[in-house]
Image (cartoon, grey):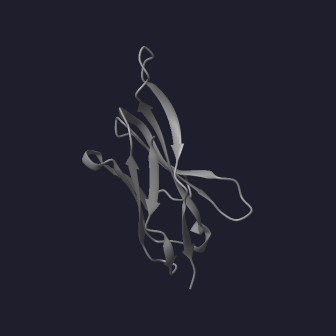
Amino acid sequence: QVQLVESGGGLVQPGGSLTLSCAASGSIVSIDVMGWYRQAPGKERELVARLTSTSSTDYADSVKGRFTISRDSAENLFYLQMNSLKPEDTAVYYCNGRMVVPGTPPFPDYAMDYWGKGTLVTVSS
């Protein structure tokens, strides 16, 4: 069973910084893609940043130059460094991973998407 657990959310003033962490645990063969999504009240969930196994990154236009996604491969930890935060960054932030998990013999390993439960980030003075 794979689990993703986010941490690091909280209240921060506009212009401030915050770092979110996501810890992946369980039977993981490999991680293809890790991403951070967010959902603001009354809005749909949106991609914030994504990091592939080849170190390719994608960012939402609204966070480019302010947010950075990174990974500690040895510990299966993922981070989202958020700088110059704005009130419109207020949302619940979710960690998402496309992971390869062991198949039950004779079936091969297979990829699945996993989600964390989210951590709230509030940007307000």
- Examine the rendered structure and indicate whether residue 18 appears above or below residue 43: below
In the picture as drawn, the residue positioned furthest to the right comes out as 42
Instruction: Give the position of the C terminus as an image quadrant.
Output: bottom right
Asked which quadrant contains residue 107, the reply is top left
Identified at 59% across, 69% down, the residue is 90
Q: In which quarter of the view is residue 56 placed?
A: top left
Q: Residue at x 50, y 74 (%)?
A: 10
Is 124 situated above or below 23? below
Instruction: Indicate the position of residue 13 as horizontal and vertical percent values.
Output: 50, 81
Tally of numbered tags:
0
Q: Is residue 65 visible?
A: no
Pick the front one: 57 or 18: 18
Of residue 23 and residue 37, the one placed in the foreground of this image is 23
**Which residue reaches farthest left?**
74
Viewer can see residue 4: yes
Residue at image point 45% right, 40% down: 1
Q: Quadrant of residue 120?
A: bottom right
Q: Position of residue 37 (x, y in %)?
A: 55, 53
106 is higher (above) or lower (below) than 75: above
Q: Is residue 35 above or below residue 85?
A: above
- In the picture as drawn, the residue positioned furthest to the front comes out as 105
Q: Is residue 32 left or right of residue 96?
A: left
Between residues 11 and 16, which one lies in front from this camera angle? 11
Residue 79, percent from left and from top: 38, 57
Identity of the residue furthest to the bottom in this view:
125
Left or right for 86, reference 51: right
